[in-house]
Image (cartoon, rainbow, N blue to C red):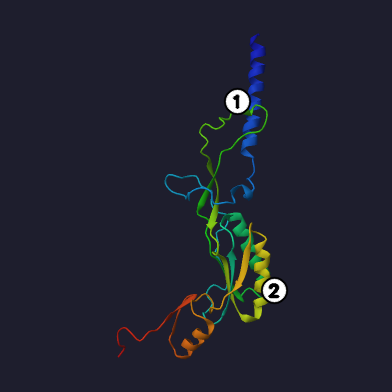
Amino acid sequence: PGPFTILVLCHIRLEKTFRVCHQLLIMGRRPARCYRFCKNKPYIKSRYCRGVPDARIAIYDLGRKKARIEDFPLCIHMVSLEKEQLSSEALEAARISCNKYIAKKGGKDSFHLRIRVHPWHVLRINKMLSCAGADRLQTGMRHAYGKPQGLVARVRIGQILLSVRSRDGVKAHVLEALRRAKYKFPGRQKIVISNKWGFTRMKRDEFEKLKDEGKIIPDGCYCKIATDHGPLNL
C-alpha cells in the first residue's frame, strides 16, 4: 500500500482508540449489589492506597445538635439485621430522607439525628471494556488488582445505623422517617425504641431519679454521674 493508504489506516486506528478511551472515561458506577457482601479483608485509605474518592456523606449529625440533655428524652435506633456493606451514597440518601421528613413534620429543632456508621472500606474495580477494539487495549486477568472506586461501611448484625433523640411529641414522625430511610439500604433493618434517656446509658426512670438527687453532670449529648468519691470541695 502507498503512503496515503497507510496514513488513512493509522487515522482510523487512532479514531477507534480515542472512541474506546472516551467510553472508558464516561463509564458509570457499578450497582451497589456488586459490593453488598463482606467478602474481602478491610481495605482502608492509607499512604499505600491513594487516589481514593471522597465519601458522598460528609455530615453525620443533623438537627438540634447542641440541645441540652433534658430536652430530648426519647431515643429511637435503626438496627441492621445483616452482615453487609452499605455504600456512602446509600448513607447519604438515608440521611437526607430522614432529615427532610422530621424537619417538615415535627420542626427542624425537634430532634437530633446521628449517623452511627462511617464508610472507611475502599472498593476496587478492574475496568473492562466491552466495545469494538477493546481486546487491543485491555489485559484480561493480568494485573487484575483494581483501582479505588468508592467507599462503603461494613456493618454487622445488631449494629446501630442511625439514632434519633427527640421530644416525646414527635415520636410518630421519627418512626415514619426511619421507616422511609430503610428503603435506601439493601437487606433488612429493624427500628427499635430505646428505653434509655436520649443518647445516655441510663434508663429513663433511673435518669429522672439521679436528676432529682442532683447527681447528673451534663456532658454534651451525654452525661456523667457525680459519685461520692473524689476530693472534698470545701
- Residue 62 visible at all: no
Mark number displayed over residue 105: 2
Instruction: Count residues near mark 1 (Cα–Cα under 10 Å), then give few for <14, some for 14-19, many for 20+.
Output: few
Quadrant of residue 127 in the image? top right
The N terminus lies in quadrant: top right
**Cα–Cα gap, marks 1 and 2:** 58 Å
- Left or right, 80 with respect to 229, comes to right
Badge 1 or badge 2: first in the primary sequence? 2
Relative to the observer, which residue lies in front, 227 or 65? 227
Q: Secondary structure at mark 1?
A: helix
Compared to residue 6, the image places residue 175 above or below, namely below
- Left or right, 90 with respect to 212, comes to right
The C terminus lies in quadrant: bottom left
Quadrant of residue 149 in the image? top right
Q: Position of residue 81 (x, y in %)?
A: 59, 62
Instruction: Count residues near mark 2 (Cα–Cα under 10 Å), then give few for <14, some for 14-19, many for 20+.
Output: some
Q: Amino acid at mark 1?
A: Arg
Relative to the observer, which residue lies in front, 199 or 101? 199
Q: Amino acid at mark 2?
A: Lys
Q: Position of residue 151 (x, y in %)?
A: 54, 51
Q: Secondary structure at mark 2?
A: helix
Question: Measuring 64% from the left and 22% from the top, which residue is drawn there?
Answer: 13
Mark number displayed over residue 136: 1
Q: Position of residue 121 (x, y in %)?
A: 51, 52
- Residue 218 visible at all: yes
Question: Measuring 65% from the left and 73% from the top, which residue is drawn there?
Answer: 174
Mark number displayed over residue 233: none
Question: Measuring 64% from the left and 48% from the top, which residue is drawn there?
Answer: 31
- Left or right, 188 with respect to 51, comes to right
Q: Position of residue 2 (x, y in %)?
A: 65, 8
Relative to the observer, which residue lies in front, 233 or 41? 41
Compared to residue 215, the image places residue 154 above or below, namely above
